[in-house]
Image (cartoon, grey):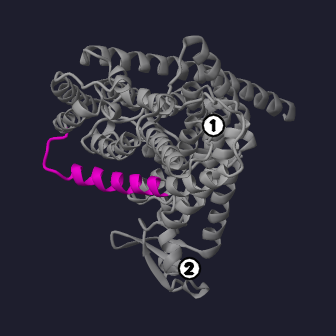
Amino acid sequence: MKKENQDEGLSNSILLLLTSVVIGFAVAGTIWFFLFVVHQVQTLAHTTPLHELAVNHAQADYRLLLALPICGLLVGLLVYYLMPGRANKGLAHVVEADLNQASKLSLREGLGVGLASAVSIGAGASVGRYGPSVHIGAALGSALSNLFPSLRKQRRILFAGGIAAAISACFHAPFAGILFAHEVFLGRLSLRAFAPVTVASVSASAAAYGLGVHIKGIPVAMDSPYHYWYEYFFFVALGVLGAFMAMLFMRILLWTVPTIQKLPIDTRLRPAIGGLILAIIGLQFPHVLGMGAEASTHAAVFQQFPLWLMLSLLFLKMATTSLSLGFGFSGGVFGPVLFIGAMLGGAFAAFADQMTGLALSPLALYALVGMGAVISPVIGAPITTILMVFEITKDYPATTAVMLAVVVAQVISRHLWGASLFAKQLKGRGMDLMESQEMRDLRQQTVEQIMQVVPTIEQNIKNSSSVIEAKTTLDTLMDRINSPEQWPIMVEKQGKTVGILDRETMLAHWMNVHQKTHNRDG
């Protein structure tokens, strides 16, 4: 019997690893198709690609006033008819699905997010491609876990594997993908999940290289290998500024999105109206729209945009991203935040150069440091941010500069703001990411699920000192019952006594939930 169990465990582990390979390839292939659709939409929507307008400082064609509203209408229809609940809840919904729904995320939702985001980005909405890619990866991981009954208990691991694969395919950064899945979703480095998540991430990176998948947006060229000693003071200052910019962006976004969504406008028409507003802004500043933003990042770094332009684009990007998401365009915030960080770093370097006259490292370094300082507080993943920079740049001195700014930004943001953007969004939905997994499990269970049904219950009523409704959640019960004298509990349903819950049963159940959570997280 023991050998049979070992053989079954070995075959299940092999199946898990093979499925992880499939997830990595599937995620890379799907992201390739996603980017293909983005480019096709941009080709159809714009006579001159947005990235060319951004680099050449050219004014957009007035066709933009027609293209963005029409694509916005298409996005509104796609979201209304394809998405569960007729709304795209963003990357925060992926975190919510992981924690509250046993990592169940429908493939229809993932592909729906991908299609709506591809149209949004190709049209020129100020949203990113990384968030939808992670959504697609999580949905594929969840869907493939359903193919084999023996893998359904490992759904959360495959879910995380899909997320790691998405990050790996987008950035060619398999280590960062692995760490991001553990840091943000699994919550800690789980040995049980490490092998399959690693296999999925590496497979996705290899497949992405073969398919030519790569989402640009991060400058990597460094002209000098070392920094001047006094620049570390500048990196600290940039970390402080990055924290405040991150907090400002999150505050604007969290105010703008619900405010716009309260407007009495049909959700199918809302993106079309937002598209018209974005088009008006984009006529003068195509730098902040769609894929023009990534070209602007590189142009600002290597062609050195003037200081006034970088500062203008920084705040315009905050506004256009909030408007895009508020009016219902689909996409992520990772790309826009990278843009904001790059403009902040570039503007800081230009200002420091003018004011101090000191010899400085290349602008590309300050753009990288600014990116790290802003993105880390927003996504709540400082270690992933640092490792991603190292993988992309292969530059140890640059990574130490980013590391210093990230730590400063994270400490300030954590103290003044709290958790990440996703944590704030989920808190608005009644979910606390800082809460333990046991408490989340107890919030979803009721007294009725663990009570003892006693045939001669009337005989036990006299022994009960407290009465509670059957649908009361267990965490509410623990708040109300705080002394041994209140046990046992008489359980009522629709005015009738249906059971007795004693203290020993409750404590045993509490320990059982804790043990299951420990086993699941590995």
- Which residue occupies the foreground of this view, 47 or 354? 354
Quadrant in which residue 317 is drawn = top left
Spot the residue most to the front: 357
Q: Exactly how many numbered labels are in the figure?
A: 2
Residue at 49 percent across and 50 percent down: it is 378
Q: Is residue 263 left or right of residue 417?
A: left
- Residue at the spot of label 2: 488
Residue 340, position in %: x, y? 44, 43
Residue at 29 percent across and 50 percent down: it is 257
Q: Which segment is the magenta one? A: 244-267
- Residue at the spot of label 1: 389
Q: Earlier in the sequence, mark 1 or mark 2?
A: 1
- Vertically, is 324 above or below 146? below
- Which residue occupies the foreground of this view, 344 or 403? 344
Q: Secondary structure at mark 1?
A: helix
Estimate how packed mark 2 is, as few (under 14), some (14 to 19) or many (20 or more) residues with alpha carbons within 10 Å: many
Residue at 30 percent across and 14 percent down: it is 43
> From this viewpoint, is residue 390 visible?
yes
- Vertically, is 104 above or below 513? above
Quadrant in which residue 83 is drawn = top left
Q: Is residue 331 left or right of residue 95?
A: left
- Vertically, is 348 above or below 149? below
- Which residue occupies the foreground of this view, 59 or 349? 349
- Secondary structure of the magenta portion, mostly? helix
Residue at 50 percent across and 86 percent down: it is 465
Quadrant in which residue 84 is drawn = top left
Residue 49, position in %: x, y? 32, 18
Would residue 307 be counted in the magenta stretch?
no
Q: Amino acid at mark 1?
A: Val
